Image (tube, grey):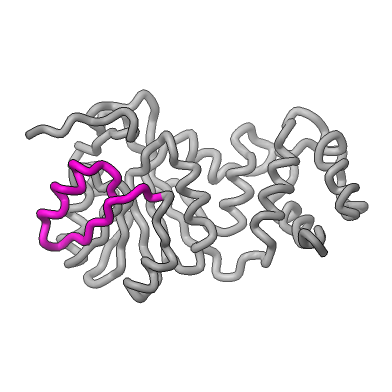
Amino acid sequence: MKHVARKRFGQHFLADSAVIDAIVRAIDPRPGQPVVEIGPGLAALTQPLVERLGRLTVIELDRDLAARLRAHPQLDVMESDVLKVDFTALHARLGAPLRIVGNLPYNISSPILFHLLPVAELVQDQHFMLQKEVIDRMVATPSTAAYGRLSVMLQWRYEMEDVLFVPPEAFDPPPRVDSAVVRMVPRADPAPVDPDRLSTLVQVAFSQRRKLLRHTLGRWLEAEGVGQDFDLQRRAEEVPVAEYLSLALAVRPAGA
């Protein structure tokens, strides 16, 4: 029986064999590696992956699709919302740095990326199909319209590159946007900032991105007692990631 894509799950199933082959080549899975696929759907990417790996863990929220996947003898199926998955426990069970892949539901792609951020040290790499616009924001450089909170938070923790463009017609049903595949490799020695502190700082900075930082971040820094040497006569998008990290390191921990 044909599975009908469900809008509430943001389902768009990859159907172009050439694109699937290109994604698998980009991932380069090797036998025995602990790979976790988010949102396997109709197994278009799952099957070529498991053929190379021997065994694959998949996370699928749709109960009908999860039931189909359980019939595959080489798949370990977790029927769950990925935002509720404990990746630390999953890493402990699989026993090696995780390789995480997936065609992420576009309606919750940013929450998934932030859910994975705290476990980056347990990950070897991540390859995700995302809306092209989201990847543009992830890899954006300062002084561009795409540069924002997502850019700073993810560039702090990962080296990233856009590895493959994917047009709408590669999917069934076709989305109304262009897609792409991003490779994310955790940095070996990231700045030792408190993630919550950095997140708050960046959120305040970009809260009114058209205004100079003295109107937004300036007041927040004054309340925190830091930032005297920080140039607030700029807009948030003009500040490089390294400067946000230095500023986050200078802010005292909450309650200190």
Q: Is residue 69 magenta?
A: yes
Check the picture and name the quadrant holding the N terminus: top left
**Vertical relation: 36 (above or below) 91:** above
Q: Is residue 74 left or right of 11 when viewed as pictured?
A: left
Indicate the quadrant where residue 51 lies. bottom left
Indicate the quadrant where residue 27 lies. bottom left
**Callout count:** 0
Front-lying residue, 82 or 202: 82
Indicate the quadrant where residue 17 lies. top left
Give, as a single range, the part of the protein colored magenta: 60-82
Residue 181: x percent and y percent? Answer: 38, 45
What residue is at 25 percent from the left and 68 percent from the top?
30
Front-lying residue, 68 or 158: 68
What residue is at 48 percent from the left and 49 percent from the top?
113
**Vertical relation: 37 (above or below) 124:** above
Check the picture and name the quadrant holding the C terminus: bottom right
Q: Is residue 40 magenta?
A: no
What residue is at 33 percent from the left and 35 percent from the top?
9
Residue furthest to the top:
176
**Vertical relation: 226 (above or below) 138:** below
Front-lying residue, 33 or 6: 6
Q: Is residue 84 left or right of 150 when viewed as pictured?
A: left
What residue is at 25 percent from the left and 32 percent from the top?
171
Front-lying residue, 236 or 4: 4
**Vertical relation: 179 (above or below) 78:** above
